[in-house]
Structure formats: C-alpha cells, structure tokens
Amino acid sequence: MEPRQGEMLMKDNQEWCRERRKEEQPKAADVNGGGPLQGASPLSPGVAPEKGNGCQDEGERRLGQGVAPSQEGAGAKRQLPNGSRREGPSEEEISEEQSLRVPQGNSGLGKGNKMGVLKRSAKEELEPTGGRKSEESMMRELSEMVQDVVKSSSWWERHGIDGTIIALNLLSLPVGFLLLRSDNLFPFLLGIAILGVVHQTLTVKGSHLATHNALAESKSWGKIWAVFFLEVCSAFTAEQGSYNHVKIHHAYTNVIGLGDSSTWKLPFLNRYVYMFIAPIAVPILTPLVAIGLLKEVELKTAIRTLCCMFVGLYSHYWLLINISGFQSMWSALSCMLVTRALLSHPYIHVNIFQHIGLPMFAADKKPKRIHMMSCGVLNLPRNPLLDWSFGHSIISCHVEHHLFPALSDNMCLKIKPIVSRYFKEKKLTYNEDSYWSRLKLFLAKYEELMVHAPPISELVGIQ
C-alpha cells in the first residue's frame, strides 16, 4: 500500500470510528479471547490510542495493521474484569509477583512501626471477589455514606456548634482581661488561663476551620474569616497558611519532601529541648516566619498582612495596659508571651504525633487517597480541653478530617463512627493511639523520627 493511500485510509478509519461511537456505547473488543487483561496497540507510531475505543480492532483490520495485544507499549490499555480501564504503566501496575507493605496490626504504634510483606499474584489481584473493591469505589462508597449524613444534618450541626464555641471564646475575652487586674493570685491565674485558652481556640480551631472554609458556606465570608483568624489573631499570612496546609499538607499527606510534616523538625535541638522548652518560643517565631514568607506574595497582600498582624499584636498589648492595668511594657509583653504560649506544648506535640512515625511515601509511588489517609494519619483520644481549643478535626477525628477536609469539627465527630466502622469492615488501617503513648514513643525514638529522614513505605497493588 502506498504511503498516501495508507494516510487516507487511516483518516477514513478515524472518522468512521467517531461516527460509530456516537451511535452506540463503546464496548471492549475481545476478538482474541485474551482473558482478564486486554491491550491494544496504537494505530501508528506516536499516536496514542483512543480511550474506550470499541471499534479499534475492526479499524485496524480496515487498515490491514491488526496486531496482537501487547503489555509493553507505553500507550497500552488494560481492562479489568469489571470493565474499568487504566492506561499504560503506572505506579499501581500489577506484575506477576509484587510485595505489599502494610503496618502490622491495627496501628503498630509505639512498636517501631514494623512493616510486613504480603505477596499476591497478578491474577489474584485482578479477580473480583465479594469483599475486595478498588480504591476508587471504596472512596466513592464512603463519600456517599458521609454525604447522606451531611445532607440530613441541620445548619446548626454543620456550622452553628463550632461558630458558637468561637463566639463564646470571644465573649469571654473581657472577663480574662478584667481578672488580670486582681491583686489576688487565683483570679490572676484564672485570667491567664482564660486568655490562653481563648487565644488557642481562635488561632488553632478558628484558623484551621477558616483555612478549609468550614465556618461558613459562603466563600466570601470564608476569606474574611481566614484573614481575621490567621492574620489578626495568629499573626501569620493567610495565603501562605492556606497554601501550605491545604495544597501541600492535605494534597500530599506523608509524601516525602511535600506533606511529610518535616517543617516541624528542628534536628539541631535535642529531644527534651524540642519537646518541652522550644514550644514556648512559638508566639515569637510565628510572626517572624510570617514576615519571611511575605516575599512570596503580592505587595498589596503583604501590606494587608503586616497591617492585620500589627492590629492583632498591638490590640493585645493595649488591652493589657489599659484594661488589665499593667504598669510597664515588659510586664505586658511577658503576659502576652505566657498567654499565647499556654497551650503551645500540646500544639507542637499533636502536630507531630499524628503524622510523623507513620508510613511515608515517595511522590511517584504514593497510594490512592483512601489508603494514604488510612496509613498516614492518626487519631488521638478525646480530651475536653484540646477538643474545645483545637477542635475535633485536629484531635480525635484527624483521619476523618483528612478524608473530608471541608467538614466542620462537629461534622467530623458525627461521621467518625461511620468512617471507623467502614475502615474496619474493609480491613483498612485505622490508626488510634493515646497522647501519653505517642509522647513516650517520640522521647524514646527522637533521633529516628525527628532527626533522620523517615523510610519510604510502598503500598503497591492494594485492591
């Protein structure tokens, strides 16, 4: 066949295929009786195969170029028994014998997180069984269950409860500042405690919910709350805070070099300084880090952030001088440091306990979302003080929060029984451990967890 004639036939074949697809649903060709895996070669070098092309084999016969299915071409299509397709070699391709590494037991926490090895054949992985589903179908099924709960919940459950908690904290601010006027020790310490808890509630719970736009259904109000809680209350930049938390940490949870929580590591500090002394410096370091990040934002955004940070810090100082009656600048600044650092220790601890020490992944070999969150996130037990000031999504419902980050703290608590039951039914890891157990683990294995790079875990071929 001459080259010109071949090109005309190829063009005619492509047009014929498009017309046929419009008339009927695409169906998988099985002319060779090739079992569970079906591949199709490109029609010509450098041309990628059409997805779901039901007329491909017949079109190849029209061109006189039909070839046997191949698994080696970069554009090869693989068809699973349930009819779903995936293209070419990827991180989840199944070879004749692959190893699957998963944490032993329910969590393997506190015991070095030893990884076990499971080997399955390709045929076993691809054969549909009653209790095995693909990652996508499991996540879709869980999402539908959660969506039903969300739809049946009132506005009060979705946003009202958490908004009321934040409002009560704001209303208690005058009480805290007035108690600091007292010459008696107990009322003075009570005032310190109130201001400390209020500060953490606004800067941790409020900022976290605002970052995920979980305080209101309006995106405009969400942006306003983000600026208020992150910049005015926390003295940090809203844009960088949202980007680093949502776009990096959530999108690449426990992925080395991206969302691996390495920003919490200070390898030059020993374990006791880091765990018990360094947290006191968080209120000082936070605005300094924020100022360093301003070079990455637009000028008008940087000016807004600096103004909001000044308003927040100066308002705190002014209230201590004029309402609480502090006589000197240094006494007021010292009180600011104490109240802002009151719960800095659990703040640092919780942030490292719930990710570091769990499986870490390479960017090109990370598992699907449901397995990434199952293996890479941990829940701590409920604690009245931390639940109030940090929120359920950070303490006892962190797994649920990473699966459904747009939900408020109260909604994460509401769906927790559904998620935990579903994970256990599907034999997925559901990490839970106590605060005390994690603290002992980090003190015992500080060099391994917080100084040296964590080992990369590979979860391959999970169905």
Image (cartoon, rainbow, N blue to C red):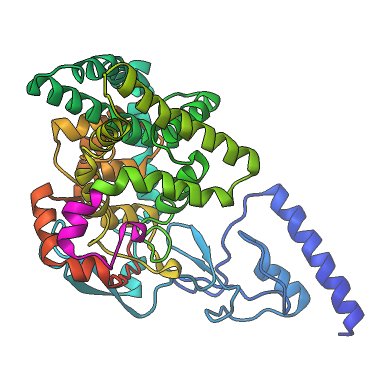
- Residue 138 in view of the camera: yes
Left or right: residue 96 compared with residue 197:
right
Task: Please give the count of numbered marks on the rendered protein.
Answer: 0
Q: Nearer the viewer, residue 60 or 189?
A: 189
Establish if 357 lies above or below 64: above
Relative to 444, residue 240 above or below: above
| Residue 332 placement: quadrant | top left
What's the residue at 57%, 71% (across, down)?
A: 31
Q: Nearer the viewer, residue 90 or 196?
A: 196
> On the rendered image, what quadrant is the N terminus found in?
bottom right
View extreme (bottom): residue: 1
Residue 54 lies left or right of residue 284; in this view the side is: right
Region of the chain picked out in magenta, as a range: 261-279
- Measured as percent of width and height from the top left, residue 193 is found at 17, 28
Q: Is residue 46 magenta?
A: no
Quadrant position of the C terminus in the picture: bottom left
In percent of the image, x 75 and y 56: which residue is there?
18
Q: In the displayed structure, does residue 127 sit left or right of residue 43?
A: left
User: In this view of the protein, can residue 108 be seen by the observer?
Assistant: no
Give the residue displayed 29% in from the left and 57% down from the top: 376
Tell me where residue 335 appears, x and y as whole percent.
25, 32
Q: Residue at x 89, y 85 (%)?
A: 2
Q: Is residue 153 above or below residue 3?
A: above
Queried whether the magenta region covers residue 266, the answer comes back as: yes
- Does the magenta stretch mainly form a helix, a strand or a loop? helix
Give the camera-side residue of 35 and 210. Answer: 210
Question: Where's residue 429, x and y in %?
Answer: 21, 55
Instruction: Name the spot of residue 377 as percent of width and height, x first.
Output: 27, 52
Q: Quadrant of residue 129?
A: bottom left
- Asked whether 64 or 362 is in front, the reply is 362
